[in-house]
Image: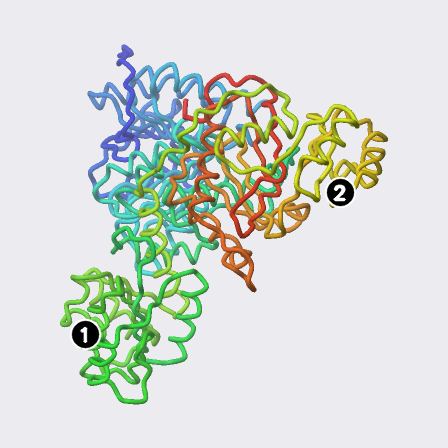
């Protein structure tokens, strides 16, 4: 047989991988139980009949088997879309090369034994990567269980995948096991799956590629994203930003206990990979959840409805039972969801529909639902402060049909409505089916309802913050600085950027220090001035409350013991709340901004908010709301009140400067003191990058 060579084709849309019309299983066998046999059987049985499947085995021919991909290609008449390689790892590079030579558009490698198996496996994986680059063939895996489109195409060796219901949610998981686990959970809760993908080792096709593909797939309304590690953080965030502008993404990130290596600054110590990944995915537009059940609850809502972008959407909570209503309210408030008090006009209207002893200000407690339930929903939804309805009731078919009440009231055509229903499966299932017909999601418990509604709100809030006008970082063109930089040089830069610092003097000898004492407002701080010392306090390099010449001499004596090359004499700020603000060059995500409670306890407390350098002014102004210590910034017990606009200016400015200066790895202001007159940078550290970057690390290459 003559081998026909077809030109390699680059398929950036991944159609030949995820929507193939022809599939060849390399390593297929007539022996039941073997991987190739299981995969071929799944492809032929699990699809809708639109896929032509070929088994490839050099020791078999006839009965649907071919001795090579070349033979199958000749038989098919045109290049095969997808080759599934169910062969030992050592044999896969040659098989992948043959597939590319035959014009196959994409390949899927099920077997393990690659990067996860040590040096030999890493070498094999590099060979696969080289082949994809040279030929343009797209590769899913290796070390993956495959993918599936329920009732369309099954390329998975998990036999029970046929029980997953079809739908509009796509699952993109780092592991094949989690791809299936999440898909089964979604299906069990009545949320169908349109595409489930296990990425495996991601030699070629990554989560970024799949997200880009799904963004253009009109059959997908929402995406579940499972993240274990990130290689190209900026590409991932760009993909999430692009996709979430059109359809929601709910993400779960593995690695709560994975703390990245400490850098010299507090910022590096506090920005763990897990925290950073979660925070930046959220900033980019994903709804980030803690558990797989939360993911399912969020997607049950977001796959069917979405709020318009808004800074603080108001939720109207209507409950037929007070106890569940309290649980829902408690969880919504804990998730920073607004449940506003209804207007007097709305409450007056509700009072004519409900018994007098029920609570009607929001939540609206109806008591046992009756004939006026739909009117209650309509009245609550019409309140000007309400953007969506959360409705909970026990299933009572003899009292009211909840789905019919929503349908007849028409509220679901004006604002999103989410139902929570408790009761026996048969009754709940019937109501859920009726609600699905009008696009209203149903959740099975009070907490699940609160989780789904919170996801709805956070999705809307995130899109609002990203759409807000990104004010310019600064109107001042700040110069580059000489590195390494001492504290005085760092503060000179902050001055140029429009960031307040205390009055100070750089002193090279005692005479200059005593002269500074007479010129500055007392008391002063006296510090070691040395670019090589980052944590001055820890070596006795900071002395506070200096008022007299005698105090100054005592401080200078101590600094001379640690061989201070120069002194910084600086007026002390008034008391207030100490924060820190840092920008650092993360190895995965590029420049990031980290802020939190400051001072020497910053690392121990770890109460931080993290954003990318793409943050807008509006996003920076809302950044500190993430902190548990946020109440301290709003006049706690008569203390100073933080201007969020002032903080946003600082955050955007520092981030922008770092992004524009790749020779710098870290800029840290700690403490950044909040006083009655505003924010003042009491200390500043600027660290050089360990090596000159090969490209501007602030932007994707």
Left or right: 181 with respect to 218? right
Mark 1 = which residue? 405
What is the quadrant of the N terminus in the image? top left
Residue shown at 49% from the left, 58% from the top: 634
Which secondary structure lies at badge 2?
strand
Q: Position of residue 539 (x, y in %)?
A: 78, 36
Name the spot of residue 119 as percent of width and height, x first. 60, 23
Q: Is residue 359 left or right of residue 633?
A: left
Picture residue at 28% right of the left edge, 65% below the top: 418
Residue 322 in sight: yes
Looking at the picture, does residue 122 appear above or below residue 498? Answer: above
- Give the residue pinned by disc 2: 546
Q: Quadrant of residue 672?
A: top right
- Considering depth in this image, is 673 or 323 the residue closer to the camera? 673
- The answer to whether the residues at label 1 and label 2 have Cβ atoms under 8 Å apart is no
The local crowd at label 2, few if under 14, some if 14 to 19, many if 20 or more residues have their Cα within 10 Å, is many
User: Mark 1 or mark 2: which comes first in sequence?
Assistant: 1
Task: Say above or below: 447 vs 48.
Answer: below
For residue 221, the mark is none
Query: Residue 548 appears at what percent x and percent y?
Result: 78, 42
Q: In which quarter of the image is residue 646?
A: top left
Q: Where is residue 233 in the image (x, y as percent from the top left)?
A: 45, 33
> Circle 1: is it few (<14), some (14-19), or many (20+) Cα within 10 Å?
many
- Closest to the observer, 115 or 111: 115
Q: How many labels does the image show?
A: 2
As rendered, which of 193 and 22 lies closer to the eye?
A: 193
Could you tell me if residue 38 is visible in this image?
A: no
Residue lying at the far top of the rendered structure: 2
* Alpha carbons under labels 1 and 2: distance apart: 73 Å
Nearer mark to the viewer, of 1 and 2: 2
């Amino acid at each position: 047989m003559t081998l026909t060579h077809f030109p390699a084709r680059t398929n950036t849309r991944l159609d030949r991988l995820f929507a193939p019309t022809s599939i060849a299983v390399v390593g297929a066998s007539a022996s039941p139980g073997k991987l190739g046999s299981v995969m071929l059987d799944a492809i032929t049985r699990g699809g809708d009949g639109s896929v032509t499947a070929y088994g490839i085995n050099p020791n078999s021919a006839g009965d649907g088997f071919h001795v090579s991909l070349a033979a199958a290609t000749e038989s098919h008449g045109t290049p095969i879309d997808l080759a599934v390689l169910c062969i030992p790892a050592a044999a896969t590079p040659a098989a992948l090369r043959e597939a590319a030579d035959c014009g196959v558009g994409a390949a899927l490698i099920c077997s393990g034994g690659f990067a996860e198996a040590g040096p030999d496996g890493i070498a094999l994986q590099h060979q696969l990567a080289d082949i994809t680059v040279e030929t343009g063939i797209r590769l899913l895996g290796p070390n993956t269980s495959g993918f599936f489109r329920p009732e369309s195409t099954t390329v998975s060796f998990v036999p029970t995948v046929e029980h997953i219901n079809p739908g509009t949610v796509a699952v993109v998981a780092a592991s094949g096991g989690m791809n299936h686990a999440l898909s089964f959970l979604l299906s069990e809760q009545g949320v169908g799956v349109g595409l489930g993908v296990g990425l495996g080792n991601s030699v070629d096709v990554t989560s970024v590629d799949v997200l880009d593909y799904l963004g253009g797939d009109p059959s997908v309304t929402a995406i579940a994203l499972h993240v274990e590690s990130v290689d190209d953080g900026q590409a991932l965030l760009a993909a999430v930003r692009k996709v979430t502008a059109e359809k929601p993404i709910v993400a779960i990130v593995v690695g709560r206990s994975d703390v990245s290596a400490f850098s010299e600054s507090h910022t590096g110590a506090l920005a763990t990979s897990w925290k950073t990944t979660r925070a930046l995915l959220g900033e980019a537009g994903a709804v980030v959840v803690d558990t797989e059940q939360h993911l399912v609850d969020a997607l049950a809502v977001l796959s069917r409805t979405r709020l318009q972008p808004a800074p603080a959407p108001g939720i109207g909570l209507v409950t037929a039972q007070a106890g569940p209503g309290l649980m829902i309210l408690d969880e919504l408030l804990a998730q920073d969801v607004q449940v506003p008090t209804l207007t007097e006009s709305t409450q007056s209207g509700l009072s004519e529909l409900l018994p007098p002893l029920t609570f009607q200000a929001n939540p609206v407690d109806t008591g046992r639902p009756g004939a006026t339930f739909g009117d209650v929903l309509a009245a609550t939804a019409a309140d000007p402060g309400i953007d969506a309805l959360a409705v909970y009731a026990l299933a009572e078919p003899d009292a009211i049909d909840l789905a019919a009440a929503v349908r007849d009231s028409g509220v679901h055509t004006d604002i999103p409505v989410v139902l929570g229903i408790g009761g026996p499966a048969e009754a709940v299932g019937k109501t859920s089916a009726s609600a699905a017909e009008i696009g209203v999601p149903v959740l099975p418990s009070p907490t699940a309802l609160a989780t789904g509604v919170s996801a709805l709100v956070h999705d809307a809030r995130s899109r609002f913050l990203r759409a807000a006008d990104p004010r310019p970082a600064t109107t001042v063109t700040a110069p580059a600085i000489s590195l390494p930089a001492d504290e005085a040089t760092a503060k000179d830069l902050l001055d140029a950027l429009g960031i307040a610092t205390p009055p100070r003097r750089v002193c090279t000898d005692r005479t200059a220090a005593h002269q500074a004492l007479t010129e500055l407002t007392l008391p002063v701080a006296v510090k070691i001035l040395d670019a090589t010392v980052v944590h001055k306090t820890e070596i006795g390099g900071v002395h506070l409350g200096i008022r007299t010449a005698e105090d100054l001499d005592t401080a200078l004596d101590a600094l001379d013991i640690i061989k201070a090359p120069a002194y910084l004499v600086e007026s002390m700020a008034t008391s207030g709340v100490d924060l820190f603000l840092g920008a650092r060059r993360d190895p995965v995500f590029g420049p990031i901004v980290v802020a939190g409670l400051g001072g020497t306890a910053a690392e121990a407390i770890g109460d931080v908010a993290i954003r990318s350098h793409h943050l807008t002014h509006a996003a920076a102004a809302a950044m500190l709301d993430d902190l548990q210590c946020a109440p301290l910034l709003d006049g706690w017990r008569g203390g100073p009140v933080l201007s969020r606009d002032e903080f946003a200016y600082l955050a955007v400015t520092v981030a922008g400067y770092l992004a524009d200066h790749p020779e710098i790895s870290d800029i840290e202001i700690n403490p950044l003191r909040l006083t009655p007159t505003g924010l003042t940078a009491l200390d500043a550290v600027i660290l050089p990058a360990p090596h000159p970057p090969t490209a501007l690390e602030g932007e994707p290459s």
